[in-house]
């Protein structure tokens, strides 16, 4: 009798696995981070010449396309069914270039990967990029960026700016769509602070 029960359990398990394998995997819902653009361009560029966006990196825990949520102090979860439409580093680099070109602290801004020569190069590393969805606390989009701005006009390159800027944008709901909108707001605020820091010299 015991052997029969074992056989029935084994058969049921195999049937379940077979059914699961046969089911199509639902496609991921994809998103693009779009920061609000500056309302107007700066009247006169502070730096003559073009800025080129150099290497843009995303720290390893957040570098995949899947959205990442923080569940508690040590647990993070990647959601394969809610993902960025493109590689996050490439997407965020393009948005950096578009935003700064619109803001106008430089005469022009070249996209990442451009072969265009430029006297200034901006490197950016996103060290934090996640949704803080810890139960019992307000949901938020968390983004931190390390910037290094290099002046290549002289015989030797020199660092004009080096700093880390963080933003935590509160969300009305702990949902993927609200999170991506929060990322856009966070990036815009971070770039506003970056430009302000450049103006302060």
Image (cartoon, rainbow, N blue to C red):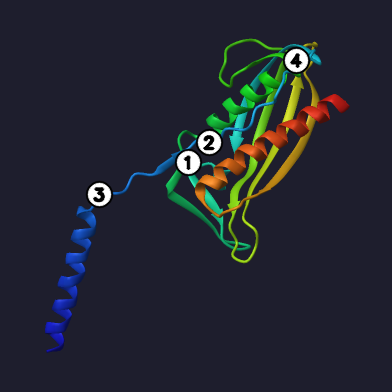
8, 176: nearer the viewer: 176
Q: Residue at x 75, y 22 (%)?
A: 150
Q: In which quarter of the image is residue 114?
A: top right
Relative to 146, does residue 170 appear above or below in the rendering?
Answer: below
What residue lies at 19% left-to-right and 53% top-to-bottom?
22
| Mark closer to the observer (1, 3) | 3
Give the distance between the C-alpha atoms of the residues marked 4 and 3, in whole angstroms: 53 Å
Q: Which of marks 4 and 1 is nearer the N terminus?
A: 1
Sequence-wise, which precedes: disc 2 or disc 1? 1
Q: Which residue was labeled with disc 1?
A: 65
Q: Is mark 1 on a helix, strand or loop?
A: loop
Q: Position of residue 85 (x, y in %)?
A: 45, 35
Mark closer to the chain start, 3 or 2: 3
State which tag comes first along the sequence, 4 or 3: 3
Q: What is the CA distance from the residue labelled 2 to the residue labelled 1?
A: 6 Å
1 or 3: tag closer to the N-terminus: 3
User: Can you identify the residue that label 2 sits on?
Assistant: 88
Residue 45: image location, x then y, percent:
78, 14
Q: How far apart are marks 3 and 2 (CA)?
A: 26 Å
Q: How far apart are marks 1 and 3 (CA)?
A: 20 Å
User: Which residue bears the numbered disc 3?
Assistant: 24
Question: Which one is closest to the eye, mark 3 or mark 2?
Answer: 3
Which residue matches tag 4? 152
- Mark nearer the N terminus (4 vs 2): 2
Q: Is residue 122 above or below residue 63?
A: above
Q: Are marks 3 and 2 in contact (CB under 8 Å)?
A: no
| CA distance for labels 4 and 2 | 27 Å
């Amino acid at each position: 009798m015991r052997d029969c029960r074992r056989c029935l359990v084994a058969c049921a398990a195999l049937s379940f696995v077979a059914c699961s394998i046969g089911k199509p995997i639902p496609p991921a819902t994809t998103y693009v981070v779009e920061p609000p653009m500056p309302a107007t361009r700066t009247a006169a560029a502070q730096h003559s010449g073009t800025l080129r966006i150099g290497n843009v990196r995303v720290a390893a825990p957040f570098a995949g396309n899947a959205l990442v949520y923080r569940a508690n102090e040590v647990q993070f979860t990647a959601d394969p069914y809610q993902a960025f439409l493109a590689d996050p580093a490439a997407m965020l680099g393009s948005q950096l270039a578009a935003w700064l070109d619109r803001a106008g602290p430089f005469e022009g801004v070249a996209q990442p990967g451009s072969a265009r020569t430029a006297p200034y190069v901006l490197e950016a590393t996103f060290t934090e990029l996640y949704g803080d969805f810890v139960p019992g606390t307000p949901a938020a989009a968390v983004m931190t960026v390390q910037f290094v701005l290099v002046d290549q006009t002289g015989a030797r390159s020199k660092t004009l700016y080096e700093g880390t800027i963080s933003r935590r944008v509160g969300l009305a709901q702990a949902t993927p769509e609200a999170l991506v909108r929060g990322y856009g707001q966070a990036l815009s605020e971070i770039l506003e602070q970056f430009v302000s820091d450049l103006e302060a010299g």
